[in-house]
Amino acid sequence: MILHIDKTLSKETVEQLAAKNQAFCIEEQEHFTVITGSAVKDVPADFEGHTLNSWVFPNDNQLASREYIKATRKVDFGSFAIGGDTKNTVLIGGPCSVESEAQIRESATFMAGLGLKMFRGGCYKPRTSPYSFQGLGLEGLKLLAKMREEFGMVVITEARDASHIDEIIEYTDVIQVGAKAMYDQGILRACAKIRKPVLIKRGFGTTLQEFVQAAEFVLSGGNPNVVLCERGIRTFETGTRFTLDLCGVAWLKKHTNLPIILDPSHAMGYAYGVADLARACTAMGIDGLLIEAHPNPKVAMSDASQQLNHAEFEALLNSLKPVAQSVGYQMI
Amino acid sequence: MILHIDKTLSKETVEQLAAKNQAFCIEEQEHFTVITGSAVKDVPADFEGHTLNSWVFPNDNQLASREYIKATRKVDFGSFAIGGDTKNTVLIGGPCSVESEAQIRESATFMAGLGLKMFRGGCYKPRTSPYSFQGLGLEGLKLLAKMREEFGMVVITEARDASHIDEIIEYTDVIQVGAKAMYDQGILRACAKIRKPVLIKRGFGTTLQEFVQAAEFVLSGGNPNVVLCERGIRTFETGTRFTLDLCGVAWLKKHTNLPIILDPSHAMGYAYGVADLARACTAMGIDGLLIEAHPNPKVAMSDASQQLNHAEFEALLNSLKPVAQSVGYQMI
Amino acid sequence: MILHIDKTLSKETVEQLAAKNQAFCIEEQEHFTVITGSAVKDVPADFEGHTLNSWVFPNDNQLASREYIKATRKVDFGSFAIGGDTKNTVLIGGPCSVESEAQIRESATFMAGLGLKMFRGGCYKPRTSPYSFQGLGLEGLKLLAKMREEFGMVVITEARDASHIDEIIEYTDVIQVGAKAMYDQGILRACAKIRKPVLIKRGFGTTLQEFVQAAEFVLSGGNPNVVLCERGIRTFETGTRFTLDLCGVAWLKKHTNLPIILDPSHAMGYAYGVADLARACTAMGIDGLLIEAHPNPKVAMSDASQQLNHAEFEALLNSLKPVAQSVGYQMI
Amino acid sequence: MILHIDKTLSKETVEQLAAKNQAFCIEEQEHFTVITGSAVKDVPADFEGHTLNSWVFPNDNQLASREYIKATRKVDFGSFAIGGDTKNTVLIGGPCSVESEAQIRESATFMAGLGLKMFRGGCYKPRTSPYSFQGLGLEGLKLLAKMREEFGMVVITEARDASHIDEIIEYTDVIQVGAKAMYDQGILRACAKIRKPVLIKRGFGTTLQEFVQAAEFVLSGGNPNVVLCERGIRTFETGTRFTLDLCGVAWLKKHTNLPIILDPSHAMGYAYGVADLARACTAMGIDGLLIEAHPNPKVAMSDASQQLNHAEFEALLNSLKPVAQSVGYQMI
């Protein structure tokens, strides 16, 4: 249940009453927002007389629910925004991993040249084997930050686990919570305390309901800048790496108020299908696309098979613009 | 392995040699096509000296493979065609089930008025419970045939099992092999003997490889007019009815030469997501769309939740046209 | 809803009233059993005054439900029975396919020598590729019948599709409805009209609810001799061929009154795991086991990797007996 | 590739050479063990002349592979051991969550009374919603440690994320890496540095190969005391909470040298099926069982539906003993 509590009560009082009711409390401009579990269906006695408005929910999709906020939330990245009434579909490009200064600069130069506003690159790789390349770590973060300074693009990178979340928050503009880390409360709770945008990827074994609840961890802590990212689920079909769940995207658009970004690269796992899928995603009317590209995919240290080369990436961008327009969006 | 055998040999001889090698034989204009299992990697001794050309394959995706025929096959429906160099995306509309003459005429009148060329309606419903509406059977087939006469649309309906496949073949223009009947060799072998187009739906538990092999049952019997239809697979996600597998569509476009039609209605299971998904499908650059619509979905005798009403269907069609254009196709 | 209707009404009358209410009607010794869809929650007016007893259900698991019949149904195979209070776990052995008279006699000789009461062998193989061995068909059925005459074992074989169901019913003692044919109403309705036992395998993409509803097709037609067989579902895990669903077996034991037979051979897909799995199945307290064995698995014409050889089969049987005893069953 | 390097080289030298080859190095009694990625198929030049033995692998299942160590590894818990030649199946009981001192003492008293050697209880609950009970945290850990002192049972509890892994390691005897934390390198790398036994649960969306690779993170860091725990995977079937993958257990027994413990409680999600499943697991010949039980399941603060009450737990234990014996194991 969500309650809007008037400001005649002090912050201390509301926080105390919230704690007593095992609820979260967020201070906002005009009111306090108090959030209990969805099993609560009546205004708790403690808040009677001070409740400006209240919402009851069938499940723990509460702050993210369209029953609470009808319009899609606007998330601001400084130089641009998505969601709200922007009708922007932001294209996020970059390599799977930051591998070296030369590689990441070549990539950033190219992406900035295409006019891209947001740049990706992995520093802590959530590899499933200890014997694979694990990423450059802090050194990679510093290289990414350097690219931001040089090219003015917003940078995004992934937190692998809670042990380095502070570094990620310090060096990057947008925190990506990866598919394998999506249940990681150490990460989610750290992201709840900041105001930088957080992009949460759906785990490949995660239900839509659980996915939204991961966002609730961040939202209920007071950070409203959450973006959801569908990147493919694991199914019986192994001809492709994962199965991009666009039915799930339709569900998310219907039931949640969060902007949605899609990642066809990881879903497909093969470069040959990425362009077709990216066009399909764009025609859904979405807030962004995350596409992996590498100056020379054949020598990439991770995800070699699915990264586009730069010529393919540019051709894709050109083909996406009319698709976005055909559904009333602009590709930025 | 596929062999093209010259016509200096008689039909009887080639058929005999094919049988001896446990192979299929199709007589074509300029040559015989002989197809063995893919384990055969060398021209069998029996065909030496008569083999014009031969193709070896890594698996039993042979006649449907782009290694054999590079371009997408053209399938002709009389008043129009798909595949080949047509760049047509055909919209197939109609109700889930034929329920009565009044209902099916209202639907056909509407669809023909929109200019649709192909009309669907189920007569033998593959329900999972004996206690649900099972379809009008032969009576439904006759009503569909009547609609074809009155409105000039090509009609398509589904074969549920082999016990009534002869009736389906007699009354309908296009034979739909349903998702639950896709392994039914009684149906597939009957479809292999005719030349009417056959639309095979992917089973919801069927791998892409098995899906293509179902088409091989029809192709190897001599019917080249096969169309594949992806309609959603069963995954752990139950927020939607099935999961439309567009990664799989990318795989099929890469590996097979058959036209592809998508069915977002059954995948989604809820009317609210159908339009977004249909636009996504169209942006993939596909050969057709199958969308369920009912004059009054609330009283539909099957699939009530996923059928569009007529106003929604018309709005959808209008929105699809620019999406098709944006990827170089026209919606017909 | 299930109704027991008294016999003061004539058979014709009850059948007429059932048809009027879109219900099934079975004549039994002491009463008529009338079955409507589960949406019906009140005794229909037509049956008022003649209803001896009635049961309401939350879904279309009705005749198979433990809410209707508490104890597990007894199914009689002539020389033995399972279910009821028998505490029998019947071991069904034999090769995947009947390949030749020599092969099937070698197998039958061995199985009869071990004291097995039921013998399996496939004649119509539901292969996913037209280029694989498809079975001996009618010739195989005749060989199986010959083995029954010679060795006195009950024989079971699989119906692939409705086009040959009459032959299967004529030649075999138990009709197996295969995993790929489980939705085939042509087969199910034919099995409903006879009294021979029917073993229905769960489709690998089939929910437990749909599985039970397939049994309802047979039960509602008047054949009470239905046995369920779990044989593995298709999941994301491809290290094994399928995933044997023993949680599902626990569900079936709780919710249905039908005997349950398990097939670990198809689930595992590799001979190495079959023995461990068969012991696990037996410890569940089940009514039977279906295990594939071949005189020489290496040259088997289908499922070569998962069939045990005869020495392995005998060792397995010996190890199963104490496991069955430890849970109060006897292996027969 | 695994290399055994002789001790004529100093530890520093071997570690330096290992680092140069991006390999792990473990010092053992008689030799150094150096582990590279499985792509390496030849002894690196740096180790020539000092390699006592070497093993090549088809994938990154290396230290855990039966190709490296044939017998199942023995893991010692102080008062007892599993694996090796012990033929022990250890029953681990306790509630889902530590809820209060009274509750945990009641549970520990009961479990110790039954003779159990290992006691479980969750302190950091990996809930999918921020609005659910999250566990007592450090307070719970202290209560568990108290129970160890009072009752002499080995205690096991779960690490939810890397932010509290140090506390878990300090207070508990066995570290459980939960299904949702299984890819968490912060946790895995911390567990690699200690020698306390680590029980890794398979993620519900995790392949067997990835599961074993998680163990490789711990093993390659030098901690040989790893136990695998299968607890159900997520499939399309929702009649039960998850699907216990016993085919996967057969695969693990064949391909890995690690002891295996099964958790039927979480797989089933309903108390009614736990006993049958536990008997099935036991008949597989496994090293342990993890069963949730609560003094009063109805008021449990988490997993209420799947926990057994104490009477059910005792009855289950009694029924498991003969099953274990029937396959040559003893239940401890």
Image (spheres, coloured by chain):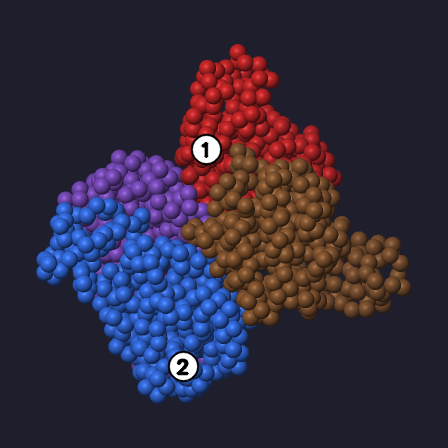
Chain colours: A purple, B red, C brown, D blue
- What is the chain letter for disc 1? B
Which quadrant of the structure image shows residue B17?
top right
Q: Nearer the viewer, residue B256 or B288?
A: B256
Q: Position of residue D41 (x, y in %)?
A: 24, 46
Q: Residue furthest top?
A: B8
In the shown orientation, is residue D163 left or right of residue A282? left
Q: Nearer the viewer, residue B283 or B175?
A: B175
Q: Residue, x 73% and y 56% (percent of image)?
A: C78
Q: Which residue is mark 2?
A: D99
- Return the mark for residue B39: 1
Q: Residue, x 60% and y 17% (percent of image)?
A: B12
Q: Amino acid at mark 1?
A: Ala
Asked if residue A311 shows in the view, the reply is yes
| Badge 1 and badge 2 both on one subunit | no
**In the rendered view, would you say A290 is above or below D80?**
above
In the shown orientation, is residue B238 left or right of residue B298? left
- Return the mark for residue B255: none
Labels 1, 2: front one: 1
Real-space Cα separation, disc 1 to disc 2, in angstroms: 62 Å
**In the rendered view, would you say D175 is above or below D139?**
above
Asked if residue B229 shows in the view, the reply is no
Q: Amino acid at mark 2?
A: Glu
Answer yes or no: do the residues labelled 1 and 2 have beta carbons within 8 Å?
no
Q: Position of residue B249 (x, y in %)?
A: 45, 40
Q: Nearer the viewer, residue B178 or D189?
A: D189
Q: Quarter of the image containing the C terminus of chain D?
A: bottom left
User: What is the secondary structure assignment of the residue under circle 2?
Assistant: loop
Q: Position of residue C233 (x, y in %)?
A: 52, 53
- What is the chain letter for disc 2? D
How would you rate the neighbour count of disc 1 (Cα within 10 Å): few for under 14, some for 14-19, many for 20 or more? some
Q: Residue, x 57% and y 46% (percent of image)?
A: C95
Q: Position of residue B218 (x, y in %)?
A: 57, 32
